[in-house]
Image (cartoon, rainbow, N blue to C red):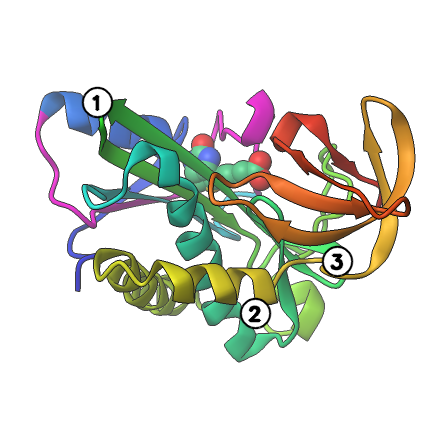
Amino acid sequence: MIIGSRLIFRENLPSTNTYIGQLLRDEKPPEGTIVHTNYQSAGRGQSGNRWESEDGKNLLISILIFPSMIKPVNQFIISMAISLGICDFLNRQIPGCTIKWPNDIYVNNDKIAGILIENSIMGENIEYSIAGIGLNVNQDSFVGSAPNPVSMKLLTGINFDLAICLSQLASDLDKRYKQVISESFDLIRNEYFSKLYRRNEWFNYRDQEGIFSGRVISVTEVGRLQIEKKSGLSEDYSFKEIEFIL
Ligand code: BTN
């Protein structure tokens, strides 16, 4: 087992991603180190947003990997593999989980997990990658500004054991990371596409020209979202350039 080879628990932290960054400056933690906590006072989300999570209710983890086999141009493979590992774990409890590009984990139209991947690039290589995961497990109500959060408990009525969830999730992520190590990139890409939220169906999106009807057809090698428009033409978007109208 690589992912989960070492577990570090802290009762509370500003952010597990930031903490792994500090560990990297002080020592060289082994690949697969997981830091987890019950509470983050400054949990970080995508686009500089905060990640809110009630004390002791959810999984708040960061994983350190050294994906030296991935060229920086292909770094989206890491996002895909982490997203798939979370879906593998969730699908055993809750069927029908999808990945809202680039890496939000959804059940129906609600977000159950978020991922924040921070890669350090050194020349032609990824020196290290910190994959932060916030998975809503036992939280009953959400008061923050996130538009559509949901938890495993809200969907199933079950109060889950966080330690068991962590160990199963680590094992699912480990299997996916081994696919990265063995360079099974086509398999990862195909499975990621098959789980894409709103794939091949017409929905509304907003780009810099306004709201339009489009359908997600693919994700490019460098991780841009490809959307076909009613005109028949398709366009590629980076994260900040396109908004899903929910
Ligand atoms: C998102 O905005 O969807 C990404 C959220 C990522 C949150 C997790 S919680 C554990 C790790 N530590 C952080 O500060 N953020 C990530």
Residue 150 within the magenta-colored segment of the rendering:
no
- The residue pinned by badge 2 equals 159
Q: How far apart, in angstroms, are the residues tagged by discs 1 and 2? A: 43 Å
Residue at the (90%, 47%) spot, across then down: 230
| Identity, as a three-letter code, of the amino acid under mark 2 | Asn
Q: Residue furthest left?
A: 27
Which stretch is magenta? Answer: 27-53
Q: Are marks 1 and 2 in contact (CB under 8 Å)?
A: no
Question: Which comes sooner in the sequence, label 2 or label 3?
Answer: 2
The percent position of residue 128, horizontal first and vertical second, equals 23, 34
The percent position of residue 66, horizontal first and vertical second, equals 19, 41
Q: Is residue 30 left or right of residue 145?
A: left
The percent position of residue 96, horizontal first and vertical second, equals 66, 72
The percent position of residue 64, horizontal first and vertical second, equals 25, 42
Neighbourhood count class around disc 2 (C-alpha, 10 Å): few under 14, some 14–19, many 20 upward: some
Q: Is residue 121 above or below residue 111?
A: above
What's the mark number on residue 198?
Answer: 3
Q: Is residue 35 left or right of residue 53?
A: left
**Element assignment for label 3:** loop
Q: Is residue 23 above or below residue 63?
A: above
Q: Is residue 101 left or right of residue 66?
A: right
Residue 42 within the magenta-colored segment of the rendering:
yes
Q: How far apart, in angstroms, are the residues tagged by discs 2 and 3? A: 29 Å
- The residue pinned by badge 1 equals 122
